[in-house]
Image (spheres, helix red, strand yellow):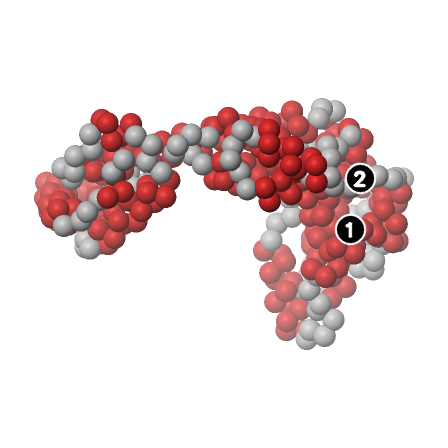
């Protein structure tokens, strides 16, 4: 059976792209494509280099190596059902959360049948594989306008098929993230994170293993929501610990109250401004000692001394000086956002 390799793939448009099954996808992605018809050689070189810096990830399959595979994949009827407004409204009502009705539009796509799901994953990954093959033979010294156009078209069509999978599974995300909603984790934030996790799950799912995508996606979205809640809790604990070290009293009653996310962001912004008034070394030491910003763990005085090239005692002095400055600034600030 003939196979398609990087050395033999032609730069011309394959015949299977004209299949009627791709008509809707073509019509929707065509306006999004960049027209490079009139670009000069220097611009094409730049575009080629840019494309070579962008990896194209996909789940490979042995069947994709056949030159006849494209015709087979796109000759089958996908038969997606039209969107239904009633499905979106029902999802909002079942969520148990006070949500704007427009969010229901995210959930209007009917669930996929097993064969539709497999076909979408197969098409998406085949299109990405085709794009990757063409990308592998790009040469900045001899840029090919037709090959660049083909790569962009393949990727756009793959994204279209990916989006059909995502929208058919959004109701799953709604049902999962609503269980993690609490005063410190809003539904909107969890939903946004959950959709990102769902997209990642689509890109990593191997359709040829024989089980449904929803099984895999449920685990991915649930783990992501749990991780989001835990990280936010740790972040709040770091902020509270920092306030206590600056002698700002946060009573047990206040800590147990439902402080909104908006107020926590205001508090973090205020602390950020206060840290901005410290010099470079003081700011670094405070952030490292209290695990703020990019620091994921609390650093010891000795580790900071080694990094700064000074003695441990000098780091202690700088930390004390920085804390004195922060206490003075905190005394002049009305931290209304900590009020219940």
Instruction: Give coordinates of residue 262: x percent, y percent.
Output: 36, 43
Q: Give the residue pinned by disc 2.
A: 80
Q: Give the residue pinned by disc 1.
A: 25
Tell which of 97 and 120 is nearer to you.
97
Q: Quadrant of the C terminus?
A: top left
Tell which of 187 and 92 is nearer to you.
92
Tell which of 38 and 62 is nearer to you.
38
Instruction: Give coordinates of residue 98: x percent, y percent.
Output: 51, 35
Instruction: Give coordinates of residue 32: x percent, y percent.
Output: 69, 60
Q: Residue at x 45, y 36 (%)?
A: 186
Helix, strand or loop under label 2: loop
How far, Cα to Cα, is label 1 from label 2? 12 Å
Residue 333 numbered tag: none
> Can I make out residue 281 in this image?
no
Q: Residue at x 20, y 38 (%)?
A: 243
- Left or right position of 211 against 303: right
Q: Residue at x 85, y 46 (%)?
A: 21
Q: Tags 1 and 2 in contact by the CB under 8 Å rule?
A: no
| Pair 1/2: label in front | 2
Q: Where on the picture, by quarter, is residue 167?
A: top right
Q: Where on the picture, by quarter, is residue 83?
A: top right
Is disc 2 surrounded by few (<14), some (14 to 19) or many (20+) residues within 10 Å? some
């Amino acid at each position: 059976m003939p196979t398609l390799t990087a050395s033999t793939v032609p730069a011309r448009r394959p015949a299977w792209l004209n299949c009627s099954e791709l008509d809707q996808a073509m019509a929707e992605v065509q306006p999004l494509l960049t027209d490079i018809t009139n670009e000069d050689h220097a611009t094409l070189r730049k575009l080629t280099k840019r494309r070579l810096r962008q990896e194209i990830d996909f789940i490979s399959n042995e069947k994709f190596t056949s030159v006849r595979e494209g015709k087979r994949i796109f000759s089958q009827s996908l038969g997606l059902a039209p969107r239904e407004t009633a499905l979106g409204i029902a999802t909002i009502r079942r969520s148990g959360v006070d949500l704007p009705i427009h969010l229901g539009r995210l959930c209007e796509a009917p669930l996929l049948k097993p064969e539709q799901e497999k076909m979408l994953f197969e098409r998406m990954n085949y299109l990405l594989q085709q794009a990757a093959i063409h990308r592998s033979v790009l040469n900045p010294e001899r840029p090919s306008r037709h090959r660049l156009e083909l790569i962009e078209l393949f990727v756009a069509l793959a994204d279209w098929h990916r989006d059909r999978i995502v929208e058919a599974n959004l109701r799953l995300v709604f049902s999962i993230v609503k269980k993690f909603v609490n005063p410190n984790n809003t539904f909107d934030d969890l939903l946004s994170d959950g959709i990102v996790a769902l997209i990642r799950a689509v890109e990593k799912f191997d359709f040829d293993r024989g089980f449904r995508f929803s099984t895999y996606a449920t685990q991915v979205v649930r783990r992501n929501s749990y991780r989001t809640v835990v990280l936010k809790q740790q972040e709040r604990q770091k902020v509270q610990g920092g306030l206590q070290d600056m002698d700002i009293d946060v009573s047990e009653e206040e800590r147990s109250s439902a402080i909104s996310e908006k107020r926590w962001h205001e508090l973090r912004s205020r602390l950020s401004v206060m840290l901005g008034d410290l010099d470079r070394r003081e700011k670094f030491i405070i952030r490292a000692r209290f695990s703020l910003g990019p620091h994921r763990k609390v650093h010891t005085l000795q580790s900071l001394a080694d990094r700064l090239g000074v003695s441990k005692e000098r780091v202690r002095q700088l930390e004390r000086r920085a804390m004195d400055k922060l206490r003075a600034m905190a005394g002049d600030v009305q931290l209304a956002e900590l009020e219940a």
